[in-house]
Amino acid sequence: MRIKFFWTGLILSLFISCWKNEKESMIPSHIPPALYSLDGDVNKLEWERWGRLLFYDKGLSRDSSISCGSCHAQVHGFADHGTSLSTGIDGKKGTRNSPAIFNVAWNTSFMWDGGINHIEVMPIAPLTNHVEMDLSMSDVVSRVNANANYQDYLFLAKNGESFEASEILKALAAFMSRIVSFESKYDAVMTGGDEFTSIENQGYILFRKYCNSCHMEPLFQSAEFRSNRERFEVADPGRFLITGDSQDYGKFKVPSLRNLSFTYPYMHHGGERSLNEVMSNYLKLGEVIFSDDTDLQGLYAMTPSESEKIIEFLKTLDDYHVLSNPNYAEPR
Amino acid sequence: MSLALALTLVATSCKKDKDNDNDNEVLAGNVKIEFEHVINEVPISLNENYILGSDTISFSTFKYYVSNVQFISADGSVWSEPNSYHLIDLSNENSALLNIADVPKGDYTGMRLMIGVDSTRNVSGAQDGALSVANSMFWSWNSGYIFIKMEGMNSSSMDGAFTYHIGGFSGPNNAIREKSLDFGSAVMMVSSDATPQVHLALDAGELFTNGINVSSNSMIHMPGAAASDFADQFSGVLSFEHLHN
């Protein structure tokens, strides 16, 4: 009797610990609340699980060749595999570097030009873009409803019998907003669990001097649109395409600086392949490269040795847990 | 037979009890609103040619959102349809006949509606029903609903075709248009035992004769001044035709 109780208890506690492990959200105290959350939805975990299946479903591209995960790979911090521009169906190339999908629940807008205003409507762009997955949303709905793997999740649908577009999008948003990255060395230092080395600390101080006004702690991104070049020499009009305001020509969203070791190459065009290349371009600011962003004038004074220290600090923003978290992985 | 009768009696008595509990149900009725799309008073069918002055015009797509329907009663009070979003699509004949349910009993002298989708629903994530993004009335790259989508052929266009995708919900690019439609001397009498029908006419002939100049601009596909102007013109050719109680 006692043994039976022991085994039942063991199995039960294992089950609970696994279940708890999947449910646990790893948002440390130095991070502000997310802007998008399904907290309070009793089926939050089920939305996330179904969303994960959808994220990795190649059936959501016209020729069933690619999934969201094809260009947003976990091993690269949910950016593409080191390519400047991603390849959609029929070998077609996109026009901008695939953004890394983590901490997106803190975003106020999506895409390099910020044209998308809500995480739930974000997936419509890659799903329907002719050089990405190239389906209509009604095709997406038909394919999802025809997929027997999703029948287990039909209880999430309002009518319980078939999925609507809004439900598919909500599930994708649930999964994407689940991908959080706050287990870097920087985060451990902020929560008192680790210490910067001397050079990292010097880099941190320099980062706050030169970089933090755009790439703001603790998310290291901002909702603003900026240009680090002479705006009208940029081939891609960027934010201008959304607002039609000439002040926005050549401006792009300030990206996160977390996980840079995995999400190369950099910039909206993916043309800068290493942090050394990025920093050496910033070192040329004011001499060879011009920008009318007055906040960047502070960078004119940066020296090469300061730049090296900043790179050492930036590496403390790498979070290897994002790469290995089984809850984010392609289901096998 | 007697069992059926008994069941009917039970059902009826239950219904009556419920009605007595809820004044709204007994004092409310339905209203139908029919949108008629015409050129020179001829109803428009998709992919048919119509003569417009010296031009011909045909539509392959003709769809638009009507939202936030309100009825104005004789005493000036306003009733608003809850969750009021309707997609009128000429490829689906039934969509041009709106059924507005649970309108409080009373006499109404006019109505208001919005052509387009209010700004809130443009920024609140994935919507369902008429606002489902599966209806191809949502811009993927610059979030927001396409309020009016008209595509077709016109002999005065440079390449023979036109594409108008009209939307925009903020600032100077706001293409949402509120339209007040006075019933004139007519009174719409809503009650539980009659369904009044309001007829509205959208004169596409007028739109393309005096509103939109296809030869100078045959394509609008983003919010902006041209889309706002189109919205003005579109709203201008919608009118109250008649109603019957």
Image: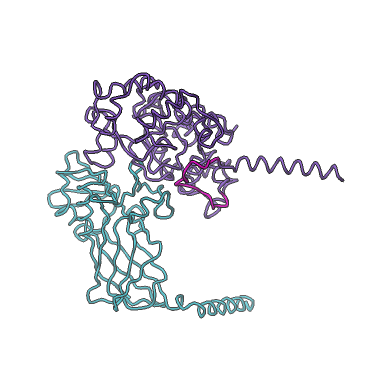
Q: Is residue B40 left or right of residue A274?
A: left
Residue at 70 percent of width and 42 percent of height? A15
Task: Please say if B8 is above or below B146.
Answer: below
Q: How far across and how far down the image is residue A86, in percent?
A: 40, 27
Q: Main secondary structure of the magenta part?
A: loop
Residue A65 appears in view: no
Q: How far across and how far down the image is residue A14, in percent?
A: 71, 40
User: Looking at the image, which residue sits at the far right?
Assistant: A1
Q: How far across and how far down the image is residue A68, in percent?
A: 47, 34
Chain A color in figure: purple
Residue B97 appears in view: yes
Looking at the rendering, in which quadrant would you find the C terminus of chain A? Answer: top right
Residue at 34 percent of width and 60 percent of height? B67
Q: Is residue B177 left or right of residue A265?
A: left
Does the magenta portion include B17?
Answer: no
Q: Is residue A3 left or right of residue B40?
A: right
Task: Please say if A290 is above or below B67.
Answer: above
Q: How far across and how far down the image is residue A114, in percent?
A: 34, 40
Chain B color in figure: cyan
User: Looking at the image, which residue sits at the far left?
Assistant: B54
Residue A17: quarter of image: top right
Q: How many marks?
A: 0
Name the one closer to the observer, A3 or A183.
A183
Name the one closer to the observer, B154 or A26.
A26
Magenta stretch: give its range: A26-43
Image colouring: by chain
